[in-house]
Each structure stands twice: as C-alpha cells, then as structure tokens.
Amino acid sequence: MPITPATAMHDAPDSTTEAILLELVDEEGTTIGTAEKLSAHQPPGQLHRAFSVFLFDERGRLLLQQRALGKYHSPGVWSNTCCGHPYPGESPFAAAARRTYEELGVSPALLGEAGTVRYNHPDPDSGLVEQEFNHLFVGLVRSPLRPDPEEVGATAFVTPQELAERHAKDAFSAWFMTVLDAARPAVRELTGPSAGW
C-alpha cells in the first residue's frame, strides 16, 4: 500500500506525526482556508470538504465497510464503501479513488460524480461533529478486495433489502443515510431498475 500522510498517520493524531489538513469551505463549496482534521470535527464543527464513495458489484449490491475499531471517529460502525477528505488542493475525484485503493485495495471502475450534499451530523458516541460539504461518487468494483485492517474491520455486499435489515440491527455512521439518499439518483442510473435502489 502506498504510504501517504493519511496512511502513515491513520486516524489518531499525536505529536510525532504531521498534521492532516482539511479544506474549509463556505456554503457554496468554495475553499476558504484549511484546518487540522481533528480540530475541524470538534463541536460545533467547521464546514469542510469531504467525499463519499458507493461501489456496487455486477449484481447491483452495495459494498459496505465496517470502520476499524482503532479509528478515533465512529469506530466499529458500518458505512458506505469509502469516505474521507481531500488534501488541500486535491480534487475530490482523485481523493475518492486514492482512499478507496488505500482502504480496500481496489481501484473503482466507472467512477462517476453523483452530486454534493451538505450536512451537520453530531456523533453522540465520540462527541465529534460532521459539518461537511460532501462530494458523492458511484462506481463498480470488479476485483477482489484487499482491505487494510487498520482502516476496515469488515466488508459486506448488500441488496436494498439486506441493507434495510442490517441498518435496523447494526450501528451505522451518523452520515450514512444522508449520503446514500443524496446519491440514489446516480445509484439507480448505474445499477438499473432491477437492483431496487
């Protein structure tokens, strides 16, 4: 796996690692500055750029990931295929492809933009706040997964019905349904009507 500031640091900042900076944005998504990753998520949160990826297999099933237990933000919860933050100056598309490879060991096929969504989701367990201007991407996965265990605890491909059942009993990220609902038009276009999204 390539070593980047994100993979070298993983999630928990300390005094020996270089700080990860996020792009701060205004309500229109225009960059207005930068902030250190953890400080941007401290209440009440600073609006920053993020991305969310939704990958599907050839049967139209969504790839979920369970966040590794060692992550300081939302550990152990299920969420979309991949999510994160571009480095300052990095395009959201490039960041989405990069992090999908770093976390899951796959390069998405037919990765396409699926719009943006802005939200404010406090996480009751960690006390952190997601104030994000989120760029959405949908695509296909066509090769075996090679998850990084420091990032990903487990993976699962699910149909809409299986997702509903899992969502009713398992813990999911605070932002999951918001980003999925915002991406649904592009998901339906990618997977077709028979997939049921």
Image (cartoon, helix red, strand yellow):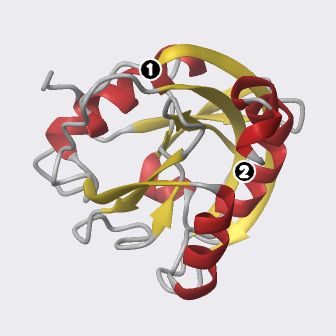
Instruction: Mark yes or no: residue 90 visible.
Output: no
Residue depicted at 63% across the width and 72% down the height? 43
Instruction: Mark yes or no: residue 14 visible.
Output: yes
Residue 191: image quadrant is: top right
Amino acid on which disc 1 is placed? Pro
Q: Residues within 10 Å of mark 1 (few under 14, many from 20)?
A: many
94 vs 164: above or below: above
In the visual, does 15 lie left or right of 38? left
Q: Secondary structure at mark 1?
A: loop
Q: Which residue is mark 2?
A: 180
Q: Which residue is mark 1?
A: 108
Q: Position of residue 72 (x, y in %)?
A: 33, 68
In the visual, does 34 lie left or right of 63? right
Residue 3: image quadrant is: top left
Q: Secondary structure at mark 2?
A: helix
172 vs 114: above or below: below
Residue depicted at 54% across the width and 51% down the height? 80
The answer to whether the residues at label 1 and label 2 have Cβ atoms under 8 Å apart is no
